[in-house]
Amino acid sequence: MKLKSSLMYVFISLFAFTVLLAGCSNNSASGDGGGTKTIKVANYFAPDHPQNIALKEVFKPVVEEESNGKIKVEVYPNSQLGAEQEFYDGVRNGTIEMGIPGMIMQNTLPKMGVPEWPFLFEDFEHVKKVLTGPIGEELMTNLEKEHGVHPLAWSANGFRMFSSNQPIKSMEDFKGLRLRMPKIDSYINVGKALGTNVTPMPISEVFSALEQGVIDGQDNPIATVRASKWYEVQTHELESRHMFSPNLYVINSNFWNGLSKKQQKIIESAAKKSANHEWELLAKSYEEDKKYLQEQGMKFITPTKEFKEKMKQAVEPLYEEHYKKYPWAKDLVERIRKAAE
């Protein structure tokens, strides 16, 4: 009798334990269980740049509200958690949960660099159509497998233009210009093709380098020129629109996989909403930013049709190199350009 009672007790205990585990599992899957998680989001943009405005106005409140406070979001702008390479490495190794880098991963994943190939896009509408569609998915195919980061949403840095402390009105004006560019081969090759002396450096060092005369100019969208206050150390802006720079919301894969399905949906949805808001902010801000910079004393130069054509011709050999090096390149470029039709 005692044996039967003991066995019954063990059976009931095991059953209760199984139910408890199932309950915990269900809580985890629904996002209702577990402690509070914190997502640190790193980027290199100034606090009032559209990227950080979108994070503060959309991503952070949506995630925190929809997770019932179980997920906290902390935004670290202006390279507070390191320059781009440093914080991207932090997201890869898990010391930082999330980041919004540019295409810094393209040195080992060449397809990720394609959106920044010169004179590829016509306008914002063209870029957004490509990156938020099937081609954008195709570009990210190996990112998680190779780098250990889960992509969430494409956002926009904008069309890059040259700011300088001297006017650039012709190809001759590029010769000898000490130009800062990111430490990414495709950028550096564009600068060299145009005839400049390229100086790679992190964005966090650009202001002081311009102020001290270490460099003569840099290339970035004008939203960045305004937000970073480079107008204090620059006099001219060439509306070259020679490249488009996207950004990508990425989250550490191990952290992502440790979230419940419900939490993943909340974060992914919030990232897409936030990125879409940022696209809209950036697209609308161009004329406002231009007016502001002009009020600060910057002079804008619109390249002539002849000058623009010469810039395109100067970088055309880069496309031929891409086509020889990557079997997929020509077809991909043709599909991107066709999307503008």
Image (cartoon, rainbow, N blue to C red):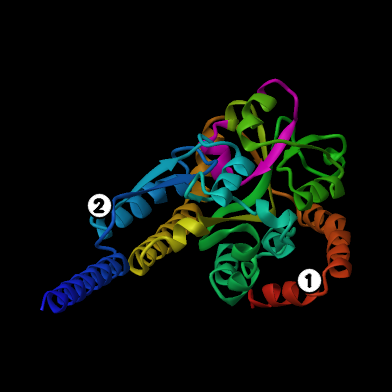
Q: In the rendering, which numbered label is found on residue 69? A: 2
Within 10 angstroms of label 1, few (less than 14), some, or many (20 or more) residues? Answer: some
Q: Secondary structure at mark 2?
A: loop
Q: Quick check: 211 above or below 148? A: above
Q: Nearer the viewer, residue 339 or 62?
A: 62
Closer to the camera: disc 1 or disc 2? 2
Within 10 angstroms of label 2, few (less than 14), some, or many (20 or more) residues? Answer: few
Q: Quick check: 176 above or below 250? A: above
Would residue 238 be visible to someone looking at this image?
no
Tell me the quadrant of the picture where the C terminus can be found.
bottom right
Q: Quick check: 10 above or below 282? A: below
Tell me the quadrant of the picture where the N terminus can be found.
bottom left
Image location of residue 271, percent across then percent down: 42, 60
Q: Which residues are magenta?
A: 211-229
227 inside magenta stretch: yes
Q: Secondary structure at mark 1?
A: helix
Image location of residue 170, percent across then percent down: 82, 44
Judging by the rendered image, the residue that carries numbered circle 1 is 329
**Could you tell whether 63 is left or right of 339 in the image?**
left
Tell me the amino acid under the disc marked 1.
Ala
For the residues labelled 1 and 2, the Cα–Cα distance comes to: 45 Å
Q: Nearer the viewer, residue 208 or 92?
A: 92
Q: Nearer the viewer, residue 110 or 56?
A: 110
Tell me the amino acid under the disc marked 2.
Gly
Q: Nearer the viewer, residue 205 or 237?
A: 205
First-in-chain label (1 vs 2) = 2
